[in-house]
Image (cartoon, grey):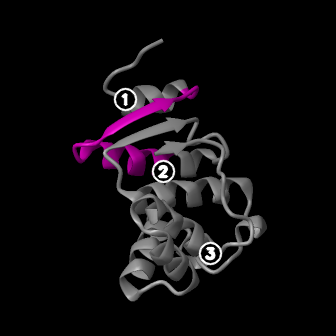
Amino acid sequence: MVVQQPQLVPSFTALQNALCGKLGSWSLLRSVRAIAAPSREERESAFAALDAVGLANKANVRADELSGGQQQRVAIARVLVQDPDVVLADEPFSALDPGLTEAIARLLFGVAAQKRTLIAALHDVEVTLAHCQRIEA
């Protein structure tokens, strides 16, 4: 999964956008059903991902009503729902303030520590040095 400029569905809620992380593993019929009326398990998974990025209180807010930083965090929640083996992240903290950057960095690098691969393009030297095991210039 690639995390970059958030490509959210503007008319979907944050919860529905987080659920979109599973679209690649679902059939068309299940995708439509899950977005329209997600099961309890699907809602809980997406809600937990939104909670992890600090947006549980925005679960029912449309993506086009969220700030740029909130949209970026919804995109990261979508990655958490997808649960990929490899995450490619292009400036995943660019729209976040310093406090949120640190929290989301801990989250993403914590996910990577769970036997996943995280490849990230970062321009914030402090965040890079604090969290990355291997740095290529």
- Residue at the image position 63 percent from the left and 81 percent from the top: 60
Judge left or right: residue 88 versus residue 41: right
* Front residue of this view, candidates 106 and 61: 61
Read off the residue under disc 1.
132
Query: Sequence-wise, which precedes: disc 1 or disc 2?
Result: 2
- Residue at the image position 67 percent from the left and 45 percent from the top: 95
- Residue at the image position 33 percent from the left and 49 percent from the top: 111
* Circle 3 Cα neighbour tier, 10 Å, few/some/many (<14 / 14–19 / ≥20): some
The extreme top residue here reads 137
The extreme left residue here reads 115
Give x and y (percent) for residue 24.
45, 58
The stretch of residues the image draws in magenta is: 102-124
Residue type marked 1: Cys
Residue type marked 2: Ile
Numbered circles on residues, count: 3
Judge left or right: residue 81 versus residue 97: left
Query: Sequence-wise, which precedes: disc 1 or disc 3?
Result: 3
Judge left or right: residue 64 versus residue 25: right
Q: Is residue 20 above or below residue 76?
A: below
* Front residue of this view, candidates 25 and 115: 25
Read off the residue under disc 2.
104
Q: On residue 58, which mark appears?
A: 3
* Circle 1 Cα neighbour tier, 10 Å, few/some/many (<14 / 14–19 / ≥20): few
